[in-house]
Amino acid sequence: MKYALTSQVSDFSMMPPGSSINLAAFMTGNLSDLPFTPESADFTEKWSYDENGKYSDVSITIPIRADKDAYRNILQGLTGKKAIFQLELISGVKYVIGSKEFVPTFTFTDGISGISSSGFTIKIDCKSLHGVFLAL
């Protein structure tokens, strides 16, 4: 998983749903790493329709089994910040979650549900009109 603050990204939310984008073309600077065990993330994207139209609801839950002292500052630094995320699936497919207009919500808890307190659990949620983008 990688992330960038929205202050480093120009708006690409005008792209149609399902678009492929070269995220680097919309950025100043580089993506930052957010380490996790790749096979452990839970990713869902659900499309719904209400009186305002069609929208995507993305949810990602990620356990991080790493040195807590090393990553606590990174996670605390992201809390309350506006950021977009790039998630790479086991298959190698990369998704971009969020945009300047549709900013994901980032939270984390100390501990991994049902396993131990030796890591963190990250939760990223995003509602948008464009859904996830495929990253080139």
Image: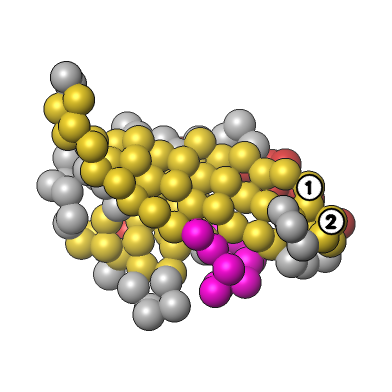
The amino acid at mark 1 is: Asp
Label 2: state its secondary structure: strand
Q: Is residue 78 visible?
A: yes
Q: Quadrant of residue 93?
A: bottom left
Of residues 43 and 12, which is closer to you in this image?
43
Q: Is residue 8 visible?
A: no
Rounded to the nearest whole Å, what is the CA distance between mark 2 and mark 1? Answer: 7 Å
Examine the structure image and report whether residue 36 is included in the region drawn in magenta: yes
Q: Which mark is residue 110?
A: 1
Left or right: residue 114 versus residue 94 is right
Left or right: residue 82 versus residue 112 is left
Q: In the image, residue 40 lies at what x, y percent?
A: 58, 68
Label 1: state its secondary structure: strand
Q: Is residue 59 above or below residue 114?
A: above
| Identity of the residue drawn at 54% across and 63% down | 41
Q: In the image, residue 106 lies at what x, y percent?
A: 56, 40
Q: Which mark is residue 117?
A: 2
Magenta extent:
28-42
| Identity of the residue drawn at 35% across and 36% down | 127
Asked whether the beta carbons under mark 2 and mark 1 sit within 8 Å of each other, the answer is: yes
Q: Main secondary structure of the magenta part?
A: loop
The way the protein has been coloured in the rendering is: secondary structure
The amino acid at mark 2 is: Ser
Q: Is residue 65 above or below residue 123?
A: below
**Nearer-N-terminus badge (2/1):** 1
